[in-house]
Image (cartoon, rainbow, N blue to C red):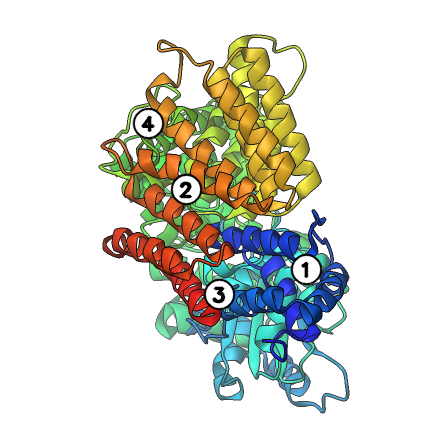
Amino acid sequence: MLEIVTVGALGALLTAVGNGASGEFGRQLHVSMGALVRRTLGRETALPATPEGWQALAGQLHPVLLRDAGAAGAWGAFMAGARPGAPVLRPGAGLPPATRYFTDRDAVLKRLTREASRAAAGRPRAALLYGPAGIGTSAVALAWGAREHGRYPDGQFYVDLREGDGDGRPTPAAVVQRLLLSMGVEPEHLPATEADRVQLYRTLTAGRRALIVVDHATTAAQVQHLVPATPEVFLLVVVTGPDLGLEAERIEVEPLRDRDAVELLRRVARPELVAEAKPELPGLLRQCAGNPLALKIAARQLLDRVRVAPDDAHGAVNGGDPVRAMARQVSRGLRPETARLCRLVALGNWPAVDARLAADAADVAEDAARAMLAEAAGAGLLEPLYDARYRFRPGVRGPLVEAAAAQDGIAGCSVAVARALDRLADRALAAARAALPGSWRTDLGQGRGPYVDEAAGLAALRADAGNLVQAIRLADEYGRTGTALRLARALWPYQLKAGNWDQVLPGLRIASRLAGRPGAGSPADSRMAGALHFQLGFCLGELRQWEEARRALDAAARSEQDAGHLLGQASCVEGLGLHLLYRWQYPEAYEQFAAAEEIYRLIGPNDAGSSSLRRALALIQRHQGRALRGMGQLDAAEAKLEQARHFFAGDDGEAYNRARTLTDLAEVRIDAGDRAGALAHILAAERLLTPEGATAHLAYLAGLREQCAAAA
């Protein structure tokens, strides 16, 4: 083993596991590695926070391995079975389809080709396309990518930053997360921090020939770390608005010339219809000002045999925005009820709009709302997404919001937003209750609604997650604090089961701030604050923002104590223990788990949480066993874990938690050098998990098998 456990290999392993994925078994491997570090060095070791820290730790460990064959063997076995995840670049779905009606842009396309094909000469290949809403920056990127498909055999990868964000702006960490997902990285293999995600991105693209398109970027910070370090990767950033100043070939997409604008009208609306509109054509061209989206909206009017009467008062000829001008004009041509629905829905800036949300905003029947959305999409105001959902086209929402203020008044707008928020919160809480039945964290008086099982409830939360985060922002803006808090509580099953920490974090920050305002005072308010601080702390911990996570969890425990809510207080103290466990602070973690157990045991038969007390105590015993293992107290750890296993094997137990506990016991046996005992626990866990299809857990158990084989 000595020739295998080199300092370089050790440093690579520590870095890969330590900075790896934050999923359940990424954390499990992380905790196991911390226990092995402590056993090797004979002392508690601080969790490194930087790549240099991991390398320094390797330097401390390696001399011990050179003189201790047993330690070297343990590390060799751990390395053989460790599965920190080694994602590979997969081509994936590629770019969305280019528009059929692409016209002109030869000069822009040539500049892109020149940047993609020039001698690298040590300069990254990157270009930035920019221009006003509707000018066709995205269309240029997609058309060029379709033409140059053969240039990039390792894949073309696309991220649209409009998706799922409403008023929010994706952080750089969230942007690289989306890109990694498009590259085929499984969610459980996503690193927790931005730096580690960027490192994985660079690893996946090293030596590759790939095109990366980031659409609708709003800041240079979102994309600056994506500038490629390898010469045959081309980053193409698309901006609706002015140049961002990114270090790239900056290319402005300018308006179409009149002859190309007429050609676009003919392609979309047929030549004979354009000929019939010849008297209005000069005014129409002035109003659209070479903007392809405005021209396409006008062409739809021609197709519908609607007389296009240019409104130069709002057109580009007088310094106006051509898309806004066409949106106003088209809105005037809609049925009054459809125009009203569009105005009221636009107020929310929802990432995705379906018939139910539109019906809530406008207070109409769902079937009627569905027909109105289809009408608005046919007129060019909305673009279809998936699952009968829509979003407003770029530049269209602004004039609709202005029209709502003018025609519906401040009171009418406020009522529409409040109605949409309240009904969305009711549905979300029902979905949350279905997704996590029996949990007090989702028990806010809502039934399961139409959701038949846990999977259906979680699917509903997943589909509406972007809208829920946007709804929290809106509720804050409109002074509807109670609604904001309920919406955030509904996110708990989604963040617990689906992850996507970056997506929910902005909403949780807002809700925690609102819940933590002084002067609330009542036990119910303190309970709500405790629950939301806990959700925030849990989320921050998953993203390894350790110090802020600790503060949030401390605040959660204090709020639950103020409320006299023993179940919540114990749960928060338990959460603090897990936070410390993942930071390799095993004695401190054990103290928190012991404190949590004491609080749990104060819960009386008539108190909240009494029905699930035995399960909570079993989980605490499991966590205590994990902490004791990290401290090297293997006999005590095994005793605690056996108590937990006994409960989970009983009539009230759960197969999955029994398998988790068996996995912990297997690791204790590996630490103790009992390969046969470890294999027996592994086999028992595999038998429980195979019918469940728990692939991540089964893969982890396979790694433990390899450790046993390597130690033989």
Choose the circle earlier in sequence order: 1 or 3.
3
Tell me if residue 222 comes above or below residue 495 in the rendering.
below
Q: What element carries label 2?
A: helix
- Determine the residue positioned at 53% across, 88% down: 151
**Which residue is the site of mark 2?**
464
- Determine the residue positioned at 26% across, 57% down: 690
Q: Which amino acid does label 3 sit on?
A: Val
**Which residue is the site of mark 3?**
185
Q: What element carries label 4?
A: loop
Q: Which mark is residue 195?
A: 1
**Quarter placement of the N terminus:** bottom right
Residue 340, given in percent of the width and then of the height, sits at: 42, 34
Front one among 500 and 247? 500
- Which is in the foreground here, disc 2 or disc 4? 4
Q: Is residue 477 shown to the viewer in this render?
A: no
Crowding at label 2, few (<14), some or many (≥20) Cα neighbours within 10 Å? many
Choose the circle earlier in sequence order: 1 or 4.
1
Q: Which amino acid does label 1 sit on?
A: Ala
Q: Which amino acid does label 2 sit on?
A: Asp
Q: How far apart are marks 1 and 4 (CA)?
A: 38 Å
